[in-house]
Amino acid sequence: MMMRRRMARRAMRRRMGRPLLRAAAVGGAGYYAGRKIAQGQQAEAMQDQQIADLQDQVADQQDQSYAAPPPAPAPAPAPAPAPAAGSDTVSRLQELASLHASGVLSDDEFAAAKKKVLAGQ
């Protein structure tokens, strides 16, 4: 009879212990799954923030590159007035030569202006 009581008590403990064990296992698994999901969401939020920061940097760089247009080139020098005498022709040729040497006139512009001065225009 004692043996039956012991077996009955063990069976009772098993019945009572198993639901608690099952609940603990389910609760632990739920906690672990929830924690992993939260970590994944946190990592995704950090990636989204990094992407947004990089997009802002690219937009700022593009704004800076489009902010100031390059300066316009200087207008071509006005044609020289017609020379009145021979000494004026020499001084005008010297002036054109100095402008050409300083880089204000290109080779083609210098040749055209020299031709006009020598033609008397």
Image (tube, rainbow, N blue to C red):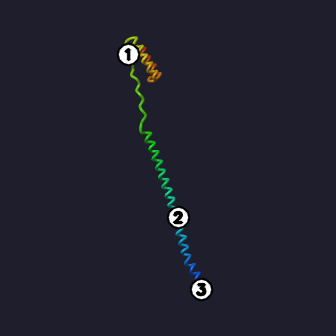
Number of marks: 3
N-term-proximal mark, 3 vs 1: 3
- Residue closer to the observer: 121 or 66: 66
Q: Which residue is mark 3?
A: 5
> Is 68 rendered above or below residue 78?
below
SS at mark 3 in the image? helix
C-alpha span from label 1 to label 2: 94 Å
Mark 1 Cα shell of 10 Å, populated few (<14), some (14-19), many (≥20): some
What residue type is disc 1 on? Ala
Q: Secondary structure at mark 2?
A: helix
Secondary structure beneath disc 1?
loop
Image coordinates of residue 45 in percent, x first then y, are 48, 55
Is 11 placed left or right of 56 in the picture?
A: right
Where residue 6 sits in the image (x, y, percent)?
60, 84
Left or right of 56 in this view: 10: right
| Percent x, y of residue 102 | 45, 22
Q: Which residue is more in the foreground, 118 or 95? A: 95
- For marks 3 and 1, give the CA distance: 136 Å
For the point 61% across and 86% down, the residue is 4
Most extreme residue toward the top is: 86
Q: Quick one: label 3 or label 2, which is nearer the N terminus?
A: 3
> Is 119 left, or right, of 43 in this rendering?
left
- In the rendered view of the protein, which quadrant contains the C terminus? top left
Q: Quadrant of residue 94?
A: top left
Q: Where is mark 1, residue-wise? A: 82
